C-alpha cells in the first residue's frame, strides 16, 4: 500500500504547474474592531504592520485552520 501512495504523490507532484506571483496589486485587511485575537496576533496582523504575506495555512486536525479562515472571511 505504501508504494501506491508514493507513486500517487510523485505523479501528483509532476503535474503541478508553476506560476509567477508577480507584484501584489491589492491587499486584504484581516482585522476589524469586532474580532478577538490575542495581543501577539493582533499586533502582528495590525494595519500598522503591512510588511507580510500569508502564503498558506497548514496544521493537524483540530488546530483551528477552518476557524481562522472563518474569522477572515
Image (cartoon, helix red, strand yellow):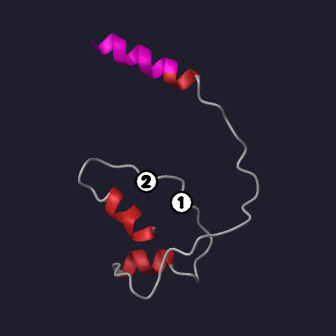
Residue 7 is left or right of residue 64, and the answer is right
Badge 2 element: loop
**Disc 2 target residue:** 57
Residue 19: percent from left, percent from top? 70, 40
42 magenta-colored: no
In the current view of this chain or complex, which residue is farthest to the left? 62
Quadrant in which residue 53 is drawn: bottom right
Task: Write the start and end of the magenta stretch as one range.
Answer: 1-11
Q: 48 or 4: nearer the eye? A: 4
Q: Residue at x 59, y 66 (%)?
A: 52
Q: Contact, CB < 8 Å: mark 2 with mark 1?
A: yes
In the current view of this chain or complex, which residue is farthest to the bottom? 33
Q: From the viewer's perspective, is residue 59 above or below residue 54?
A: above
Residue 68: percent from left, percent from top? 37, 64
**Disc 1 target residue:** 54
Q: Residue at x 30, y 15 (%)?
A: 2
Quadrant in which residue 41 is drawn: bottom left
Q: From the viewer's perspective, is residue 45 above or below residue 55?
A: below
Q: Within 10 Å of the Cα at label 2, are there few (<14), some (14-19), or many (20+) other Cα atoms?
A: few
Q: Within 10 Å of the Cα at label 1, are there few (<14), some (14-19), or many (20+) other Cα atoms?
A: few
Residue 72 is left or right of residue 17, and the answer is left
Q: From the viewer's perspective, is residue 1 above or below residue 48?
A: above
Query: CA gap, disc 2 to disc 1?
Result: 8 Å
Q: From the viewer's perspective, is residue 39 above or below residue 68?
A: below
Quadrant where the N terminus sits is top left
Q: Residue at x 34, y 11 (%)?
A: 3
2 magenta-colored: yes
What predominant SS class does the magenta segment belong to?
A: helix
Residue 62: percent from left, percent from top? 23, 53
Q: Residue at x 53, y 25 (%)?
A: 13
Residue 5: percent from left, percent from top? 35, 18
Badge 1 element: loop
Amino acid at each position: 500500500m505504501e508504494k501506491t501512495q508514493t507513486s500517487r504523490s510523485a505523479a501528483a507532484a509532476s503535474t503541478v504547474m508553476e506560476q509567477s506571483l508577480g507584484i501584489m496589486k491589492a491587499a486584504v485587511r484581516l482585522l476589524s474592531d469586532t474580532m478577538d485575537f490575542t495581543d501577539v496576533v493582533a499586533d502582528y496582523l495590525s494595519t500598522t504592520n503591512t510588511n507580510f504575506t500569508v502564503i498558506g495555512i497548514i496544521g493537524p486536525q483540530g488546530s483551528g485552520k477552518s476557524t481562522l479562515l472563518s474569522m477572515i472571511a
